[in-house]
């Protein structure tokens, strides 16, 4: 069972080596790592090229944003299972993908799985924890979503439900998971393990402005998928979730 990891980069010279190294150090043997770069202006591509035999495919060309780049990587992927790892994130430990593969092998009926992650600061200290739970219908309307960097799908899921929508700035990953889990009723599994260390300060963790954009895009996602969106309910549960993270 091959697992393809897609990493999108743009001016990621400060972090990409740690990201690639965390993939390379995985104990699971059958991994394909694809990096899609958006014509970085720093030394991102040079750093990747200086790490021979660690990245299986490297594409560096102009794109239409992060989700367009992710879609490129997914189209290139040859694995049975496909996931993403942000260029400033790392796997929590060397056994993360072995745990993912074992769960898919143990539960062949599932279409996708997700786990937990931790948020770390510049000193690599844990400042928040994102502990998920088993999916049930209606959770997305309560501001619940799987941690996208821990979300893995069989390739057939992308073939059936499509890729990320590129007209979203921040929340195309949430819209995709909404489309797959809530609307498509794909069979999912919650792997109760920390899989990823996520750096604070990314596009979707940058404070009030990103929260407002995500909320607007979630309303759009619900509408496009034929679902009602109750803003007071969503914001109420959003507040509860923020308290859980602190």
Image (cartoon, helix red, strand yellow):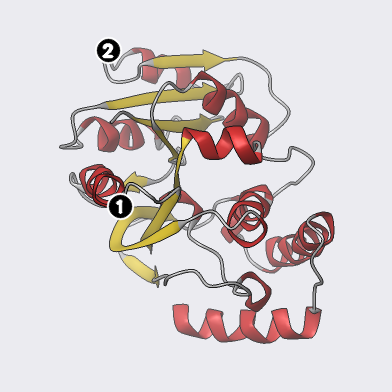
Q: Is residue 215 left or right of residue 121?
A: right
Question: Residue 138, position in %: x, y?
Answer: 63, 75
> Which one is nearer the viewer's eye here, 233 or 102?
102
Residue 190 location, x and y as percent? 38, 63
Residue to which mark 1 is pinned: 107
Q: Give residue 15's mark.
A: none
Q: Residue 215, relative to residue 46: is it above or below?
A: below
- Taking the spot 27% from the left edge, 38% from the top edge, the residue there is 22
Q: Secondary structure at mark 2?
A: loop
Q: Position of residue 141 (x, y in %)?
A: 68, 74
Point out the image quarter for the N terminus: top left
- Residue nearest the viewer, comparing 44 with 59: 59
Secondary structure of the residue carrying tag 1 is loop
- Residue 71 position (above or below residue 126): above
Q: Residue at x 74, y 62 (%)?
A: 218
Residue 119 left/right relative to 106: right
Compared with 127, 62 (above or below) is above
Return the residue at label 2: 52
The answer to whether the residue labelled 1 contacts the one labelled 2, judged by CB atoms less than 8 Å apart, is no
Marks 1 and 2, Cα distance to the nearest angstrom? 35 Å
Q: Nearer the viewer, residue 166 or 42?
A: 166
Q: Is residue 183 left or right of residue 88?
A: right
Residue under the point 46% across and 83% down: 244
Could one spot residue 120 in this view of the protein? no
Q: Residue 189's quadrant in the figure? A: bottom left
Say whether disc 1 or disc 2 marks the residue closer to the N-terminus: 2
Q: Residue furthest left?
A: 27
């Amino acid at each position: 069972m091959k697992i393809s990891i897609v990493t999108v980069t743009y001016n990621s010279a400060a972090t990409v080596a740690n990201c690639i190294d965390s993939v390379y150090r995985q104990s699971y043997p059958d991994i394909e790592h694809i990096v899609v770069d958006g014509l970085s202006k720093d030394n991102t591509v040079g750093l990747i090229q200086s790490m021979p035999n660690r990245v299986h495919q490297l594409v560096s060309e102009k794109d239409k944003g992060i989700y367009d780049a992710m879609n490129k990587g997914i189209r290139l992927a040859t694995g049975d299972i496909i996931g993403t790892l942000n260029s400033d994130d790392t796997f929590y430990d060397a056994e993360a993908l072995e745990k993912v593969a074992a769960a898919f092998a143990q539960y062949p009926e599932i279409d996708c799985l997700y786990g937990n992650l931790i948020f770390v600061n510049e000193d690599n200290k844990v400042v928040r924890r994102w502990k998920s739970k088993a999916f049930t219908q209606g959770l997305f309307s309560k501001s619940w979503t799987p941690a996208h960097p821990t979300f893995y799908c069989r390739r057939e899921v992308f073939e059936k439900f499509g890729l990320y929508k590129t007209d979203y700035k921040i929340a195309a990953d949430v819209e995709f998971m909404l489309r797959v889990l809530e609307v498509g009723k794909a069979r999912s599994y919650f792997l109760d393990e920390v899989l990823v260390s996520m750096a604070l300060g990314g596009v979707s963790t940058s404070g009030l402005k990103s929260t407002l954009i995500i909320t607007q895009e979630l309303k759009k996602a619900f509408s496009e998928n034929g679902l009602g969106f109750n803003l007071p309910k969503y914001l109420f549960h959003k507040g509860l979730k923020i308290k859980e993270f602190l």
